[in-house]
Amino acid sequence: MPPTLDQLRRYAVARSLFAPTTLMRAITKLGFVQADPIRAPARAQDLTLRHRVRDYRAGELERRYPRLPLEEDFFVNYGFLPRAHQALMHPRQARVAWTPARWKQAHAVRAFVAAHGAVHPRQVDAHFAHGKTTNGFGGASNASTQLLDGMHYRGLLRVARRDGGTRVYAVREDAPPVAAQEIPARLDALLDLIVNTYAPLPAASLRQLVGYLGNGVPQWRDACRPALLRARQRLQCARVDGVDWLWPDGERAESRRWQPDEDARLLTPFDPVVWDRRRFEQLWGWSYRFEAYTPAPKRKLGYYAMPLLWRGQVIGWGNLSVVAGALQARLHYVAGHAPKDTAFDTALEAELARMRVFLGLEG
């Protein structure tokens, strides 16, 4: 018998919100942690990891990153992933070809970085004086910053660390060429990584994510569709309420082991549990939207609405901020009011207390 929607819901929550462990083990278990620069009240990567890493504090990933076998890179989005997974995507060939003049600039910058070990974009800008350029938002950016971004994407540089949130670059060793016969196995591993991170997935969401994988492996974009067909053959699949769902082979979505805990959790919009808006609405019956880039008068949930999970249900959302050193939480509920259960009151207060400790506002 296929699982019920309620079983899929429990499976989606429990497999992703596993028992807290070490930082490296948590990232390896997730497979990929999406990054975002907005702090509301902390960056997305930190808000994702705080539920899954013991005694995690905001900024810990940035502090410990230089000592861990991790890389910042593009996958289906930009974020952090184990070095072994990142290596599957390189050598990367960008869709936009650089001119010989651009490559000459890149080689000069790479030699400069190699001579210095690790460099801040300000050092590159001061040395080369590349000037200004128009960024993707229509504003002005340092041309050196744009060049460094392109070099990082093409695998010429890696992020060695961050200083105050700014990427500091080092030279990345050239990846060896990939033989044609190796490409299917690499793509299969990358699709398995997608499914591991976001399962269970509606079939339409898996297609969407495989499309996004084209940002990580533009050189193999044409091979992604056959890889998707192979994935459909090896993954478990069931039609539930008219929707085809997929998840890793060997996992039983209907198993009783997948049980939600009693904790209340405020989740970042980029958390694997809530990232897929299609899946979110199918599992929890209401539409969630990320509105940070929506004009304020048109927002319905708030600038950085964090879905509120309790007992396997997303019952509302909260907008959190730190004002004068104190955490402020504005909470809203799908039902129009909080659950009339003292257990929820206790769970919510515990979650807000954990958030204060995570942000360094207590202790």
Image: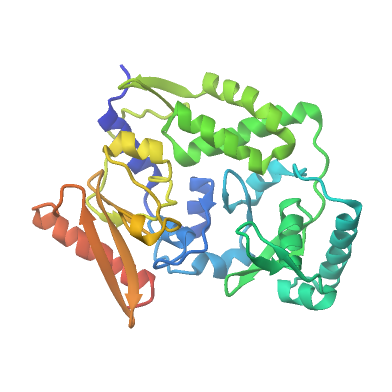
The residue at the point 71 percent across, 39 percent down is 218
Whether residue 248 is visible here, answered yes or no, is: no
Q: In this view, does 259 lie above or below 183?
A: below
Q: Where is residue 58 in the image (x, y as percent from the top left)?
A: 44, 69
> Which residue extends farthest top?
1
Quadrant of the image for the N terminus? Answer: top left
Residues 250 and 72: in front is 72
The reply, left or right, for residue 266 in relation to residue 96 is left
Does 228 sit above or below residue 135? above
Q: Position of residue 193 (x, y in %)?
A: 55, 38
Residue 290 shown left or right of residue 81 in the figure: left
Q: How is the image coloured?
A: rainbow
What is the number of callouts on the image?
A: 0
Where residue 291 appears, as percent x and y from the top left, is 40, 54
Q: Which of 22 and 136 is in front in this view?
A: 136
Identify the residue at the far bottom of this view.
324
Closer-to-camera residue (32/337) = 337
At x 39% / y 36%, what residue is drawn?
278
Residue 11: x percent and y percent?
A: 34, 36
Residue 213 falls in image quadrant: top right
Look at the image and tell me whether residue 126 can be seen: yes
Q: Is residue 134 rendered to the left or right of residue 339?
A: right
Q: In which quarter of the image is residue 221?
A: top right
Q: Which residue is drawn at 57% across and 70% down?
A: 165
Q: Quadrant of the C terminus?
A: bottom left
Left or right side of 17 for 164: right
